[in-house]
Image (spheres, rainbow, N blue to C red):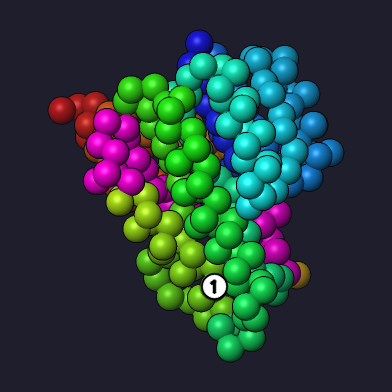
């Protein structure tokens, strides 16, 4: 049974990915900041697979140690998905209004925590393990009020591909899942109707297909992956 660690797995894309993997026989370690929705997700997963749910803030070193201990207890990890993210406020502030405390918190969650978690679990990664860092189009394009969040994701993209250069035995994906109908996306657009965005459950199967695709390390957009994977299958 393959083993995966997924951060930010209580809601949205993280939850959808956990359920998709559980249906395919993966054993899971999941975390999230809020214990109640995490417990609800763990309950849904427990009917499908073995799951260990550990509530806590991924930006906290002691919490990361708990996740590493869980990985050690499994003996190996085949997959790590760094999905947990901090938005940087709601509504999103312009850079001129983004104070140092909020920006440092955002960077701690979106950039430092993935690097430190990966660094700690490296001894438990299976040869040819896959690591996915969830990015954003805001890491490439420039939108008003998205400077704090976007710059953290741009740095995460760079970090991911540097990992790929330094640790080529593993596969490293920086994934832009696209706009989705999630609580986090709603917080970015308070009071607006986001019902036209994709449901995370429609994106999760594409991400799972990427995991087993054999595609080289790199930055990928979920919107492009269906065609890319289809072409790879034909070839």
Q: Is any part of residue 181 visible from this angle?
A: no
**Residue at which label 1 appears:** 148
Please say if 11 is above or below 184.
above
Indicate the quadrant where residue 72 lies. Answer: top right
Image coordinates for residue 226, horizontal then vertical, percent: 35, 39
Task: Please indicate whether residue 7 sits to the left or right of residue 140 in the image.
Answer: right
Q: Is residue 28 magenta?
A: no
Image coordinates for residue 148, horizontal then vertical, percent: 54, 73
Q: Is any part of residue 36 visible from this angle?
A: yes
Please say if 188 is above or below 54.
below
Please say if 30 is above or below 135.
above
- Compare residues 30 and 193 and report the one nearer the observer: 30
Q: Residues within 10 Å of mark 1 (few under 14, many from 20)?
A: many
- Compare residues 24 and 102 and report the one nearer the observer: 102
Task: Please indicate whether residue 103 sits to the left or right of residue 177 in the image.
Answer: right
Position of the C terminus by quadrant: top left
- Residue at the top extreme? 1
Q: Is residue 176 magenta?
A: yes
- For image coordinates 42% across by 48% down, the residue present is 175
Which region is colored magenta? 163-190
- For image coordinates 46% across by 61% down, the residue present is 153
Image coordinates for residue 182, horizontal then vertical, percent: 66, 52
């Amino acid at each position: 049974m393959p083993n995966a660690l997924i951060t930010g797995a209580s809601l949205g894309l993280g939850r959808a990915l956990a359920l998709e993997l559980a249906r395919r026989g993966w054993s899971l370690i999941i975390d999230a900041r809020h214990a109640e929705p995490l417990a609800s997700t763990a309950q849904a997963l427990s009917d499908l697979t073995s799951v260990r749910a550990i509530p806590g803030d991924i930006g906290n070193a002691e919490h990361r140690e708990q996740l590493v201990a869980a990985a050690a207890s499994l003996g190996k990890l085949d997959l790590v998905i760094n999905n947990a993210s901090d938005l940087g406020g709601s509504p999103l502030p312009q850079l001129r209004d983004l104070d140092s405390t909020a920006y440092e918190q955002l960077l701690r969650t979106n950039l430092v925590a993935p690097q430190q978690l990966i660094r700690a679990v490296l001894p438990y990664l299976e040869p040819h393990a896959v690591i996915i860092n969830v990015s954003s189009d805001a890491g490439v394009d420039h939108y008003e009020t998205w400077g704090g969040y976007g710059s953290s994701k741009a740095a995460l993209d760079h970090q991911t591909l540097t990992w790929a250069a330094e640790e080529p035995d593993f596969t490293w994906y920086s994934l832009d899942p696209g706009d989705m109908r999630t609580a986090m996306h709603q917080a970015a657009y308070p009071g607006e109707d986001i019902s036209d965005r994709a449901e995370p459950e429609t994106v999760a199967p594409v991400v799972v297909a990427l995991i087993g695709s054999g595609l080289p390390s790199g930055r990928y957009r979920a919107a492009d992956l269906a065609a890319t994977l289809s072409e790879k299958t034909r070839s």
